[in-house]
């Protein structure tokens, strides 16, 4: 029987993290590197990916790498897989973390986020990165894992893939109802789609030794406006947003042998928000 330390040990395992130079992508890499894993941070911003990987590698003494790739393009995803196999000889973990980050516009501007005026171009771009990108990466890297008979895919979804956004969180005083900002429709669609993709892939590759799960975090504090933080915290039983490092335990658990009998599952880490 393995010890707890052995169950969480990722020594020698290569983990590809899309959106790897972003706020949470770096933290995911840190979590895996702390257990001996080799994170490969993949991002459109190659300089940022390389720099963050060097920092993680130096801190945890693992051969972390940063690489550039556009996950919406099949040829670039295939080239990425080939480059990783050439460099490391294997791939063990894929974390589909890449997503467009919807921004709130300045007060007084026409609110593009509302459903009635949401641009088709923005819809297509958000779906391409968050959902099509996850499909393409899963298809390429998952097939390689299935060929080897072992692997883990983790899709980063959201509590808003489980519940609808509470649009009251985004309201601004003095703004007409038909101009109030909202959480864009694409965010819910992408995150819900990732949970569906998780279930599909989990059953598709179950006999090939590839486990596929989703992680659905609640809001993570990152200097958001005080009024927004107050409103959101009131919806959470624990009374606060998540700290930047409070997903790392779940990431490590779902990517390691500690979760070896879990597949097709959506793990919600939201301070209890979806209980209400």
Image (tube, helix red, strand yellow):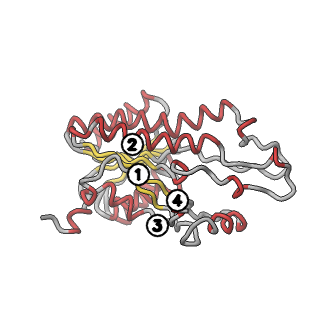
- State which quarter of the image contains the C terminus: bottom right
Task: Decide: is 51 above or below 18.
Answer: below
Q: Is residue 1 left or right of residue 227?
A: left
| Of marks 4 and 2, the one in the foreground | 4
Relative to residue 219, is residue 30 drawn left or right? Answer: left
Q: Which residue is mark 1?
A: 266
Identify the mark nearer the N-term, 2 or 1. Answer: 2
- Of marks 3 and 2, the one in the foreground: 2
Looking at the image, do the residues carrying marks 3 and 2 touch, with CB atoms under 8 Å apart? no
Contact (Cβ within 8 Å) of mark 4 with mark 2: no
Q: Number of marks in the image?
A: 4
Q: Which residue is mark 3?
A: 246
Residue 211 location (% of width, % of height): 29, 46
Residue picked out by circle 2: 198
Q: Quick one: label 3 or label 1, which is nearer the N terminus?
A: 3
CB atoms at circles 2 and 1 under 8 Å apart? yes
């Amino acid at each position: 029987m393995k010890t707890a330390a052995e169950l969480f040990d990722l020594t020698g395992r290569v983990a590809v993290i899309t959106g790897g130079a972003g706020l949470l992508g770096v933290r995911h890499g840190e979590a895996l590197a702390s257990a001996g894993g080799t994170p490969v941070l993949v991002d459109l911003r190659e300089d940022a990916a390389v720099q963050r990987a060097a920092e993680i590698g130096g801190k945890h003494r693992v051969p972390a790498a940063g690489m550039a790739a556009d996950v919406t393009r099949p040829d670039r995803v295939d080239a990425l897989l080939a480059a990783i196999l050439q460099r490391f000889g294997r791939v063990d973990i894929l974390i589909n973390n890449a997503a467009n980050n919807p921004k709130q516009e300045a007060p007084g501007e026409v609110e593009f986020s509302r459903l009635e005026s949401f641009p088709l171009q923005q819809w297509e771009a958000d779906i391409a990165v968050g959902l099509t990108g996850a499909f393409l990466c899963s298809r390429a890297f998952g097939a390689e894992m299935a060929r080897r008979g072992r692997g883990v895919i983790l899709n980063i979804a959201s509590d808003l893939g489980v519940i609808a956004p509470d649009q009251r969180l985004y309201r601004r005083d003095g703004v007409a109802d038909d101009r109030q900002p909202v959480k864009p429709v694409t965010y819910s669609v992408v995150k819900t789609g990732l949970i569906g993709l998780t279930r599909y892939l989990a059953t598709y590759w179950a006999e090939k030794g590839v486990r596929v799960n989703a992680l659905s975090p609640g809001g993570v504090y990152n200097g958001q406006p005080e009024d927004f933080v107050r409103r959101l915290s009131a919806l959470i039983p624990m009374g606060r947003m998540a700290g930047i490092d409070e997903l790392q335990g779940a990431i490590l658990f779902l990517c390691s042998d500690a979760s070896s009998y879990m597949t097709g599952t959506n793990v919600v880490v939201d301070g209890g928000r979806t209980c209400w």
